[in-house]
Image: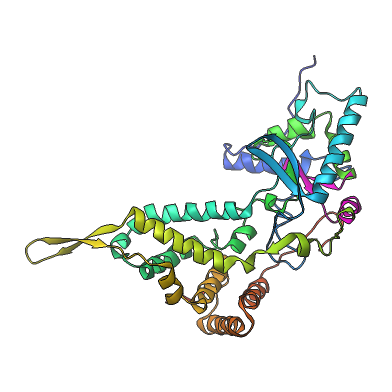
Amino acid sequence: MPVFNDTYLAKGINDLGAKNLYEERIYYKLGAYPLYGPQPLDLWYKVPLYGKIDHEGDAVFWTGYYGKVLSKANASSVSIAPDFVAEAFENFKTEYKNSAMLNKKHDTFTEPALAEIKVVRGYTDVHQEHRNHFQTFHNIFSSDFLRENGREQKMRTFDDYLKFFVEAAESIMPYSALTKTGYILSNLCTNRISGLIIEIANAPAGNDYIKHKNYIKNGNFNMYRNFARKHGFLLDKNMPWRLIADITTIEMKKYMSNAGISTEDLFEKYYEKSHHHDIQTLKVELYEFYKQYVQVYPTFQRVTPTRHSTKVCLIKREAISKAEFEKRYDMNFWIKLYLYLRTKESNLNMGKSQFDAKMRHAQKLFQYKGLTEATDYINMEIRRFTERTFEGEGTKPGGYKFTF
């Protein structure tokens, strides 16, 4: 058996020094992938929002409607995808398997990475992902942020909690996000929430050597990517074991037509705009996390100096009932807080007069037309200052301080 020569393989890995890592990443980006044949989608640098925004540039997520099971390896492992994606994948998998059986050059022993096609990971539930993200923020907020500068001894009511929440949120934005829409638009949220992505391996995305050797230089790679393209899939440039359903290709459009949809109405029928859910999610998360905090830390010690010594008092934190919560914090308050968080997540620095004008307009829309119209307006105003485009192979589609 000939010795494998890895001289010309990319060797980028996160443990490398900055200079070497930069050079290796550039080499992989420019030189690893073949220049001929179906080209991949670059979800890291070129189209990071693919499947996470609709044609209008709004953050969306697949509802799970019209889903089909891709695999069921065991009772705890089920992968699903939209019906047209599942049909395309099954046909791709079958054709790849049949061709491999007839192709004497198909190598299943020395290059096992592409020996067979099987689902490892598919759709990811955005609601659970966002909940986990918010929980991580709250864990840091509770264990670190509140314990700095005596904040823990100043937090007795939900009002106090909100003030510190906003202060903590300001400290992480725009580098992180807390609303579901902000989370979806960030690189913290996987594109798998779209249902348009299927992964056939669980390999490290940060290891260029594995990507280059096991996949791109695999003897079965051309058959793999050509059959994938034949059924409307493109590969992820930075994760070649990841198949992306490209809804702009003729092939995928045929599968969509079989399901009774088109590229134009896909997002309307299969997806929901996340900003329609943001305020309700924010309300639930803040109420539940405050409730959780009070249960774990029902009291705190307040130390005050006296003339000759110090006085220690045990202070009980105030719980708040759901009814009181709804009464005290009306929708006008949540619209104001939501607009503020979205501007900070989007790194938009509005002056007070500009912010107040948009806030009052959104509140009037809520009063006369409802919450959907109000959040549509907020979303439109935020989107005006950001450029988001949905792209595939076939088409190229400072400021105000929050006060209570």
Query: Considering only vertical position in the picture, is 275 above or below 377?
Result: above
Q: Residue furthest top?
A: 1
Q: Is residue 164 visible?
A: yes
Q: Residue furthest right?
A: 102
Instruction: Depth check: give the residue in front, 20 or 85.
Output: 85
Quadrant, the N terminus: top right
Q: Residue furthest front?
A: 323
Residue 84 appears at what percent x and percent y?
83, 50
Q: Which scheme is used to colour this image of the protein? A: rainbow
Residue 339 appears at what percent x and percent y?
55, 73
Residue 147 appears at what percent x and percent y?
33, 56
The residue depicted at 77 percent of the width and 65 percent of the height is 268
Q: Residue furthest left?
A: 308
The residue depicted at 83 percent of the width and 34 percent of the height is 221
Instruction: Depth check: give the residue in front, 46 or 153.
Output: 153
The residue depicted at 58 percent of the width and 37 percent of the height is 16
Residue 181 appears at what percent x and percent y?
62, 63
Left or right: residue 324 versus residue 205 is left
Left or right: residue 275 versus residue 341 is right
Q: Is residue 98 magenta?
A: no
Quadrant, the C terminus: bottom left
The part of the image, by quadrant, that contains residue 17 is: top right
Q: Is residue 403 visible?
A: no
Left or right: residue 125 versus residue 84 is left
User: How many tags in the picture?
Assistant: 0
Magenta stretch? 231-257
Q: Is residue 237 magenta?
A: yes
Query: Considering only vertical position in the picture, is 384 above or below 167?
Result: below
